[in-house]
Amino acid sequence: MKRILDFIKLVFFSTSVALVLAILIVANPVGVAAQAYTLDQTREATFARAYYYLLAHTEWPSVNRSDLSDRVQLRFCIEKDHILFSALSSIIPKYSISGKPIMVDVLRPDDDVSLMECDVIALGGNEEVNRTVIKKTIGAPILTVSSESDITAYGGISYIPLGDRLLPPKISISALTKSRLVIGASMLDLSIKSWPPKANGMPADSN
C-alpha cells in the first residue's frame, strides 16, 4: 500500500512540474534569450531616464543665450555612436523641462554653429571626439554628460556610468561653475555623497 501511495505522489509531482514548465514555455516561447533581452531593454530605459532626471535638476542661464522661458524647446544633442542612442532618442522626447518639449538631435562635432546651439550634449566613448567637443564648448551653458567615458576628468560636467546598478551622476563642480549652469542642491548633495562609489567610504572627488 505504501508503495502505491509513493507512486501516486511521484506521478502527481511529475505532472505538476510538467504543468509549470508548460506554462513558462507558453509565457516565454523563446526562453532565456527573450528574458535577457527584456531585462537589457529595461536597464537601458532606466539609464535613459537618469539623464532626464539630471536635466530636470538643471537650470540654464539667460547670459549669452535666450532665457529658457523664451525658447520653444530644449535641444538635446547626442553622439550617433552613443551606447544609449536608441533609448535616449525614444524616451527623452517624452518629457519636458519647464513646460518646454525636448528635441533630440544627432550631435555634429565638426559643425561649430550647430554645436553651440545644443543645450545638452550626450557624448559617447570616443575620447578624441569628447575632448574636441568639450574644448569647443567649455564655459558655454551646455550640459555635457557621458556614460561610456568619465568626461569629468577632462572638462566635462557630468558622468552617469553604466553598471549593475544605477549611481547618481558624478558632477565636476569646476566645469559646472564655468558653464554658469545651476544644478539643484539635492542632486549635487547626492552626487557628492555617492562619489567615488563606496570603496573607501569617503565623499566624492568633485574635480
Image (cartoon, grey):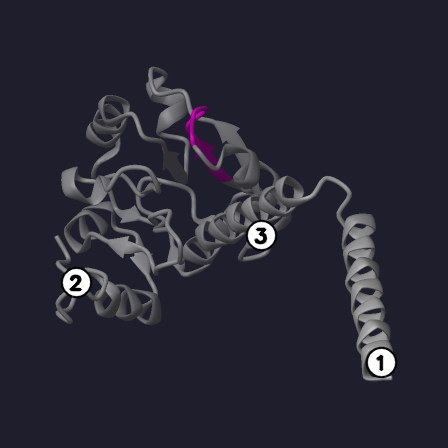
Disc 2 to disc 3, how far (Cα)? 30 Å
Q: Residue at x 69, y 43 (%)?
A: 31
Q: Looking at this rendering, what residue extends furthest in the top direction?
A: 110
Using residue 94 as the reference point, say whether residue 186 is left or right of it: left
CA gap, disc 2 to disc 1? 65 Å
Which quadrant of the view contains residue 148? top left
2 vs 3, front mark? 2
Q: Secondary structure at mark 1?
A: helix
Disc 1 packing (10 Å; few <14; some 14–19; many ≥20) = few
- Residue kind at label 2, given as amino acid type: Ala
In the picture of the structure, the residue carrying the numbered disc 1 is: 5
Residue 112 lies, in percent from the top left, at 33, 20
Does residue 57 show up magenta in the picture? no
Please tell me which residue is depicted at 18% across the width and 55% down the height of the picture: 173
Check contact, mark 2 vs mark 3: CB within 8 A: no
Crowd around label 3: few <14 · some 14–19 · many ≥20 (10 Å): some
Q: Position of residue 66 (x, y in %)?
A: 42, 43
Q: Residue at x 25, y 66 (%)?
A: 194
Tell which tag, 2 or 1, sits nearer the viewer.
1
Q: Quadrant of the N terminus?
A: bottom right
Q: For residue 76: magenta?
A: yes
The residue labelled by disc 3 is 96
Q: Earlier in the sequence, mark 1 or mark 3?
A: 1
Please give the range of residues in magenta.
75-82
**Is residue 11 shown above or below 148?**
below
Residue drawn at x 39%, y 37% as measured from the top left? 122
Q: Residue furthest bottom?
A: 1
Q: Which residue is mark 2?
A: 204
Q: Secondary structure at mark 3?
A: strand
Q: Amino acid at mark 1?
A: Leu
Tags 2 and 1 touching, CB below 8 Å? no
